[in-house]
Amino acid sequence: MDRRTFVGGAAGMALTGLAGCLGGGGSGAETNVGMVYALGGLGDEAFNDMAHAGIQRAEEELGIAYDNTEPTGQSEFGTFQSQFASSTDPNYDLIGCIGFAQRSALQENASEYPDQNFMLVDAELDADNVASYTFREHEGSFQVGHLAGLLSTREFSHEGTYSGTEKTFSSNPDEKVVGFVGGKENPLIKKFEAGFIAGVEHADSEIEVRTAYAGSWNDPGRGQEIAGSMYDEGADIVYHAAGATGGGVFNAAGERGRLAIGVDSDQSLSSDASHTIVASMVKHVDTAVFNAVQNVVNDEFQGGSTIALGLDDEGVEPVIGTEYEGEIPQDVLDALDSSRQAIQDGEIDVPTEPEN
């Protein structure tokens, strides 16, 4: 498929497709998908990039074609959704709306284009032509909080590099402090915060969890400033749920020889500060995107339903950083297995909102 550009009508916006290519005769060779990403765009090494990995997998395995759009403001969501929906060359079999912030615009467009299939990630919309995918982020966040609490209260260190310099990245058992950095403050990110705090407390109720919000998904400098203050005030591990802003958390950890926890993808695989990333709370948006496309290819679109993914179906999971494989003490790993099972069995009820 050639690169295409649609010109928006009254809004005068350009919808530029970073197009995938038609596959070689796969079952989805005539299936076209339009992807409308969350603010922050591709290259965030987190939420959007995981969604992109899912559509790339669909292209490779199912032979579909796709186009991407990267809105730069809230007002563009509805425009890009409607441009895909009204397109006749090609007709889009599915439009992927990535991120809860698209719900309002999609509510209008789903009604305006009742014959168009949409998928919505991170929010629910009750419409026959919308398949909603949500995640139990609080469960995965509990697990990385449990890990942070267990490591924070013991001597733990890792030899690695940051910015070309050999460093030791370590915990600080003399200070019972860890941190959480969010992007924009909203109910979804509060689920990350709540789960993380509960997990830390499960490890040791005396550990203090400091939290702050950057107010942006794409401001690494602000993320670095916030996390730097947390580290300077005694935190030895900081978890972020802040999109591209989280890159600054890793830099702050690298400068100080401390530890960080990534989000959405295994960020240790893509970050230049991989030696700071002891683990990531992986949220399998890629699986949601792939499954939604596969359902369309198989004529099994799940419109009008909400699919919630958590620990029990590997929708979310803690993943040890690639530089830390084989270094996490076995008793810590065993404790994580136990808390995971307890969550799945209903013995641990993970909160979705912070207590304070």
Image (cartoon, rainbow, N blue to C red):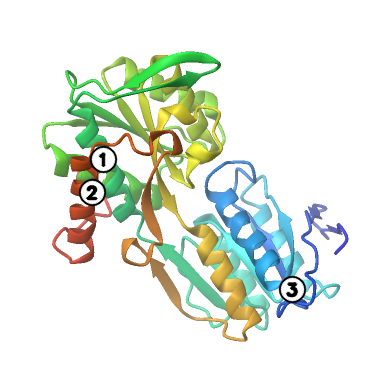
Q: Considering only order in the chain, which callout, 2 or 1, is on the residue closer to the N terminus? A: 1
Residue 107 visible in rendering: no
Which element is circle 1 on?
A: helix
Which residue sits furthest bottom? Answer: 299
**Contact flag, marks 3 and 1 (Cβ < 8 Å):** no
Q: In this view, does 152 lie to the left or right of 13?
A: left
Q: Residue 280 carries which label?
A: none
Within 10 Å of the Cα at label 2, are there few (<14), some (14-19), or many (20+) other Cα atoms? many
Marks 1 and 2 sit apart, C-alpha to C-alpha, by 7 Å
Marks 3 and 2 sit apart, C-alpha to C-alpha, by 43 Å
**Contact flag, marks 3 and 2 (Cβ < 8 Å):** no
For image coordinates 51% across by 58% down, the residue present is 285
Q: Is residue 265 above or below residue 244?
A: below
Image x and y of residue 104, in percent: 54, 62
Q: Considering only order in the chain, which callout, 2 or 3, is on the residue closer to the N terminus? A: 3
Residue 175 visible in rendering: yes
Which element is circle 3 on?
A: loop
User: What residue would you read off at disc 1?
Assistant: 147
User: What residue would you read off at disc 3?
Assistant: 92
Q: Which of marks 3 and 1 is in front?
A: 1
Say what amino acid the circle numbered 1 marks. Answer: Leu
Residue 54 lies in what quarter of the image?
A: bottom right
User: What residue would you read off at disc 2?
Assistant: 336
Marks 3 and 1 sit apart, C-alpha to C-alpha, by 43 Å
